[in-house]
Amino acid sequence: MTNSEKVDAYIKKHSKWSDKLQQLREALLQTKLTEEVKWGAPTYTYDGDIVVGIAGFKNHYALWFHQGVFLKDPKKILITAKGGNAKAMRQWRFEDGDKIDTKLVKKYAEEAIANSKAGKKVKPVKKKGVNIPPLLKNALSENTELKKAFSNLTPGKQREYADHIGSAKQEATRKRRLDKAVPMILDGKGLYDKYKDC
């Protein structure tokens, strides 16, 4: 299956937004970007670097600018991805009834291409180690099967669970989060794996 066919399939799968995703796709294809599929979603690259992606979700669809932090964003339409924790990625979110200004989409894409050409890139900071909260630490020490499954996860997935459980303010919430996480850990799944094919 070619990249184009994979993108066709992705757009068809997101039937609620098919027409809108196709509109975004056509606007991006009018630039110098190359259409590919990465992480199961349409992405548009320039000289091998991901510049922008499109995605459909339950209640919205979006453009993801991978180095969007460098975009001027005169219309103030970009939001910080990942709940405000992303250093570089910015999202342009569309909801039901929103009109797509394809000229503006292309303008943002062209600026993102220019930034990519100029080498503007936030370099990821390697995180070292995992700070395991006491509740999770106790659960791991009491359950050898859980400990083995947790140690088989990638450091990134381990951090996701540790941060998710440890960040709750109340003990009851931390406990609920742990209870929900245990079966996922035992299945070898990451906390956010279910969102990979959204």
Image (cartoon, rainbow, N blue to C red):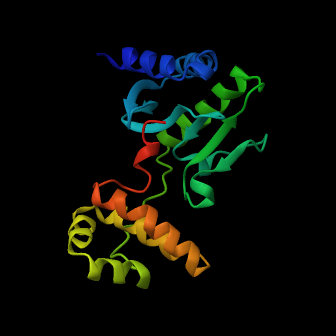
Residue name at image x 42 percent, y 85 percent: 134
The quarter of the image holding the N terminus is top left
Q: Is residue 167 visible?
A: no
Residue name at image x 54 percent, y 53 percent: 88
Spot occupied by residue 28 in the image (x, y as percentages of width and height): 55, 23
Q: Is residue 28 shown left or right of residue 96?
A: left
Quarter holding residue 78? top right
Count up the numbered dots: 0
Q: Is residue 108 shown left or right of residue 89?
A: right
Spot occupied by residue 51 in the image (x, y as percentages of width and height): 49, 37
Which of 164 and 128 lies nearest the eye of the viewer?
164
Spot occupied by residue 127 in the image (x, y as percentages of width and height): 38, 70
Residue name at image x 66 percent, y 35 percent: 59
Quarter holding residue 86? bottom right
Spot occupied by residue 108 in the image (x, y as percentages of width and height): 65, 34
Q: Is residue 125 shown left or right of residue 72?
A: left
Q: Is residue 42 visible?
A: yes
| Vertical relation: 39 (above or below) 102 | below
| Vertical relation: 3 (above or below) 126 | above
